[in-house]
Image (cartoon, rainbow, N blue to C red):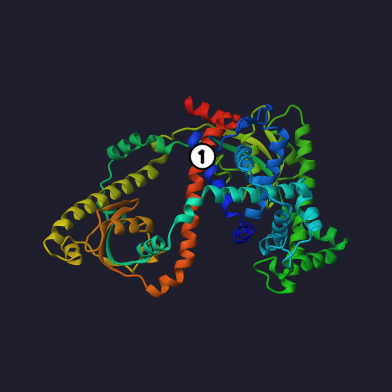
Amino acid sequence: MIGTIRKHSKWLWILIATLTIISFVYYFNPGQRMNNSSGGSSNGNLGSVYGEKITQDEFASVEREFELFYFFRYNEWPDKLSSDELERQVYLRLLLIRKAADLGIYVGDNEAATAASGILNSPELARALKINGQSIPPDVFVKEVLEPKGLTAADFENFVRDDLAIQQLVHSLGLAGALVTPQEAAAIYQRNHEEWDAQIVSFSASNYLSQVTVSPEAIAQFYTNDMADYRLPDRVQVNYVVFDVTNFFPQAEAELAKTNLNEQVEDFFRQYGTNAFADATTPDETKAKFRELLTRRQALEDARTQANAFATTVFNLEPTRAENLAVVAKQQGLTVKTTAPFDEQTGPTNFDATAEFTQDAFGLTPDEPLAGPIVGPDGVYVIALAEMLPSEIPPLADIRAQVTQDFQLHEAISRAQLVGTLFAKSLTNSLTAGKSFAVACVAAGHVPETLPPFSLSTQELPEIGDRANLNELKQAAFTAGVGHASEFVPTDDGGFVVYIESQQPVNEVQMNADLPQFLASLRQEEETQAFNDWLGTEARKEFGNVPIFQQALNGAAK
C-alpha cells in the first residue's frame, strides 16, 4: 500500500473521488451547484451516514483533513471554494472514512509514520513551499504551514491515516481493474495506435457569408425567435474611489528603509533561492524581485490604511447615502470613477477586480449603498451603489448590429451544413461507382486536403485548425473505416467529411516497449471506473439523509 501511495504522490485516487462527487451533485440538481446554501451545519443537523449520525466534532475534523488534502493536491488552500462545495467535499471524505472503518481497514503507526515522512520529504511539497532542498522538518511544517491555518499536528496525523485507509478502500473496491490481461491490453494498444492515412473536405461558414441575404424582416424574425439568447443578467454599476498601490510606493520605500529590509531580502533568498521567480535567473534579479514584493506589500498596507480612514468618514455621514462617497472624495481631493455595468459572473471589465469586489458590489442595496475597503491586486477600493440593472432583453434597436451579425453567421452555418450533407450523400454514390475521393470532391467543387497520419491516441493535430474537433475527427475516422468516407459531421463552424485511405499497423518494437506501462495505466483506469461506479451508487443512497443534499432534492422536486 505504501508503495502505491509513494507512486501516486499527488493523491490521484482521492482526486478521482473528489471529481466524482461533483458529478454526483449534478445528479441531484444542476441548478444548486453554484448557489449559496444554509447547509447542514447552520442548524446543527448534519444528517447521518451508514445509519450513524454525524457529530459537529467529526465534521469539523474531516473538514480540516480536506483542507490538508486540497493543499497537498493543488498547492493552495481551498479558500476559493464556495461554502456549499466545501461542505459537499467534506461529506464525501467522511463517507469514505466511515466505509473504510466498516470494512476493517486499519492503518498502523509504522505505515502512518512512513507516509507522513514521505510527504514532508517530497520534492512536490518543497517546491510548493518554495523551500530549497527535499526535506521539511516536522516542527517547521507545523509552525509555517499548519498553525497559520488553525491546524495542528494531530490534524495532519488524522489526514495521513485516513488518506491511507481511503487509498486501500479504493484499491479494494476497484480490484476488477487488475483483471485486464496483457493480451487484452495489447489488443487495445493496437486499436489505439494504428494510424490512419486520411483526406478531409471541410465546409466553413465563412465561405457562405456572402450568400446570405439580410433584410429587416429576416432580422426581426431571427431576433423574435432567439430573444432569450439576448437576455442580459442582473447587473450592477458602482462608483468607486481607488487607492492605487503604485501611489504608495515612495512612502513604502521610505518606511522600509528604516527597517532591516536588506536582511529580510537575504532571508527570503536563503529560503527560496533563485527558483522563486520564473523571470529572475540570477541572485541579484531574485533579490530585486523580493525587494519589489516587500515594497508592494507595504504599499498595499499603506493604501489600505488610507482607504480605511476615507471609508470611515464616508460611513459616518448621516443619513447613509450612496452620494456620500462623492461628497467626501471631493472634500479630500480624490477622484470618483464609475464602472461599466457588470454581472455577477464576469465582474468589472475595466480593471482587475477580485471576487470579493464583485460579491460586495452585488450586496449593495439602497439602504446599504456603501462597501469597503476592498483590497485588490493593484489597489484598495471603497464603493457606492450607482445603479442596479435587473435582467432584461434589450430591444432590437439597441442591438441590431449584433443580431445582424448573429443572423448572418447562423445562416452561413446552415448553408455550409446543407451543402456538406448533400455532398456526403452524393459521395457515397461516387465511391461506389469507383471514383476516388479526390476526384469526387473536385467534381462537386470542393478541395480535399491530406491530413498527417493520426490515430485514436493522437493528442493534437494542428493541421486541422478550426475546421474540426480532434475527438470528432477521430470518432468519424473510427466509424467510417478504411476505404470509406464518414457521414457529414456538423461542427460549430459548419462541418466536414473525412475519407480513410488506409491504416498503418503499429510499430511492434515500440508497442513491446510501451506495453508494460500501458497495461498498468489501463488497469488503473479500470480500477478507477469500478470505484467510481461504486461511489456513485453509495453516495446516492447515503446522502439522502444529509441536509444539504436534501435541499437539492427538494429543489429538484419543485
According to the picture, the residue beneath numbered tag 1 turns out to be 24
Secondary structure under badge 1? helix
**Quarter holding the N terminus?**
bottom right
Q: How many marks?
A: 1
Residue 476, quarter of picture: bottom left
Query: Percent x, y for residue 382?
Result: 70, 41
> In the displayed structure, does residue 390 sit left or right of residue 266?
left
Query: Percent x, y for residue 219?
Result: 31, 40
Query: Percent x, y for residue 377?
Result: 68, 52
Q: Amino acid at mark 1?
A: Phe
> Residue at image x 77%, y 64%?
291
> In the displayed structure, does residue 236 sit left or right of residue 299?
left
> Residue at image x 59%, y 31%?
548
Which of these two is toward me, 192 or 81?
192
Residue 355 shows in this picture: yes
> In the displayed structure, does residue 189 sit left or right of residue 206?
right
> Residue at image x 48%, y 26%?
557
Query: Percent x, y for residue 169?
Result: 58, 47
